[in-house]
Image (cartoon, rainbow, N blue to C red):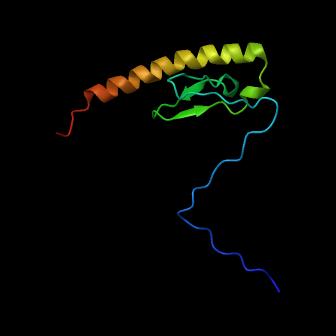
Amino acid sequence: MESEESPPNPSAVLGLPAPAGPRSQVIDLSKGGSFAFEALGPVVVNEDGTMARIANWHSMTAEEQSTTQRVIAARNNVRLARLRAAQATVEPLD
């Protein structure tokens, strides 16, 4: 006889699995601290204002990471300036 699984509860809160490995660490940010996710690489600002990360950041050499970070920072500044200018020209709906 096959066991019948109950359907998932849509109101149940699902959690992420606990981090594993030697690089796992807990950082208390409750007192207003901050944390940089350097291992994930720089944040890329797309032309539409969405953000992403570089998928192969962990496989780049230190020199490639440095070059990529410099190029991304310059491109992000141009894109952010363009997005801010476009936002400033839009009139509020009040």
Figure check: 77 above or below 18: above
Q: How many marks?
A: 0
Q: Is residue 83 left or right of residue 51?
A: left
**Residue at (58% x, 26% y) in the render:** 43
x and y, in percent, of residue 35 in the image: 59, 23
- Near-viewer residue (86 or 17): 17
Q: In this rendered view, identify the residue nearer to me: 92 or 25.
A: 25
Q: Of 5 and 49, which appears nearest the observer?
A: 5
**Residue at the image point whose x is 51% and y is 24% from the top:** 31
Q: Quadrant of the C terminus?
A: top left
Residue 18's spot in the image, x, y percent? 72, 43
Q: Quadrant of residue 67?
A: top right
Q: Quadrant of the N terminus?
A: bottom right
**Which residue occupies the extreme left position in the image?**
94
Instruction: Point out residue 69 in the picture as x, y percentages from the top left corner.
Output: 63, 17
Above or below for 76 versus 55: above
**Which residue reaches farthest bottom?**
1
**Residue at figure coordinates x 53%, y 19% from the top left:** 75
The answer to which quarter of the image holds residue 48 is top left
> Which residue is drawn at the image coordinates 49% and 35% (left, top)?
50
The percent coordinates of residue 37 (x first, y second) are 64, 25
